[in-house]
Image (cartoon, helix red, strand yellow):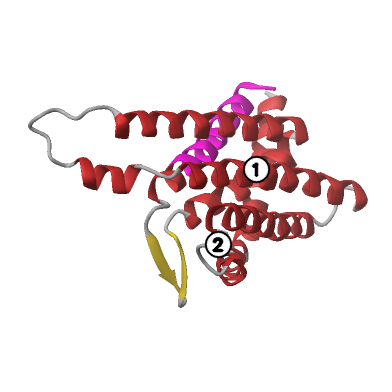
Amino acid sequence: MNTFEHKALALLSSLFIGGLVVAALIASKIIMVAGVAVPAGVLAYSLTFIVSDVISEVWGKECANNVVQSGFVTLVMTSALAWLAVEWPAAPFWHGQESFSAVIGSTPRIVAASLVAYLISQKHDIWLFHFLKKRTNGKHLWLRNNASTVVSQLVDSTIFVTIAFWGILPVGDVILGQWMVKLAIAAFDTPIVYFLCHALRKQVQTADAL
C-alpha cells in the first residue's frame, strides 16, 4: 500500500467513524422527512454505508471489517464517556444538567439497540457486497452497492427499532418508515460510490507508477 492509499484510507475511515459518532450524538432529536418521523442521525449514519462500500471495493473485505470493528469500539467508548459525563456531579454554579442529560444521555436499551444493530448490519453489508462481487465476477458495482445497502439498512432498522421500542411504539410502522427514508438516501449514493472508486483506483495506479 503506497502513501496515497494510506492517506485515502485514513480519511475514509475518519469519515466513517465521524459519521457514527455524529449520528449517535444527534439521534435523540426526531425529525420529519417527507412526513416520516426519523432520528436526526439518519443522514450521518447512511454515510457510513457509502464509505464501507468504497473501502470494500477498493481495499477488500478484511480492511472494511477492520474499519467496522474500529467503529464499534469507538461507539462503545463514546457511549461510556457520555454516560460518565451525564452521571458525574456537576459544578455547583452550573444549572444545565437536565438539558445536558436530555441531549447526551441515552437509556441502556437505546445504547444496546444501537450497538447490536450497527455491528450486525455493517457486517452483513460487507458480506453481501463481496458475495455479490464474487457472483458477478467483479462486475456490476451498482448492483452490489445498492443490494447490500438496501438489505443491510432493513436489517439495521429492524434490529434497532425492535430492541429499542418494542412495547412502546408500533415497531412495524417505525421500521418501515425508517427504511423508506434510508432507501431514498441510498438512491443517491451509487454515483458517489462510482466516482470515489474510479478516482481512488486512478490515483493508486498513478502513485504506483511513480
Count of numbered labels shown in the rendering: 2
| Quadrant in which residue 115 is drawn | top right
Task: In the rendered view, tell whether residue 186 sits above or below residue 138.
Answer: below
Query: Residue 86: image x %, image y %?
Result: 31, 35
Residue 53 in view, yes or no = no
Q: What is the C-alpha distance between the residues marked 1 and 2? A: 33 Å
Residue where numbered disc 2 is placed:
167
Q: Amino acid at mark 2?
A: Gly
Query: Camera-side residue: 140 or 131?
Result: 131
Q: Residues within 10 Å of mark 1 (few under 14, many from 20)?
A: many
Query: Picture coordinates of residue 21 (x, y %)?
Result: 45, 40
The amino acid type of the residue labelled 1 equals Ser
> Residue at horizontal 53%, vertical 58%?
165
Farthest-out residue, bottom = 35
Q: Quadrant of residue 78?
A: top left
Camera-side residue of 164 and 53: 164
Residue 18 in magenta stretch: yes
Q: For this view, does 184 lie left or right of residue 121?
A: left
Mark 1 highlights which residue? 52
Please tell me whether residue 82 belongs to the stretch shown in magenta.
no
Residue 170 marker: none
In the image, is residue 20 above or below residue 162?
above
Q: Quadrant of the C terminus?
A: top right
Q: Residue at x 78, y 55 (%)?
A: 144
- In this view, 97 is above or below 70: below
Which segment is the magenta one? 1-21
Q: Position of residue 137 (x, y in %)?
A: 91, 48
Q: Secondary structure at mark 1?
A: helix
Mark 2: few, some, or many residues within 10 Å (few <14, many ≥20)?
A: few
Nearer the observer: mark 1 or 2; the answer is 2
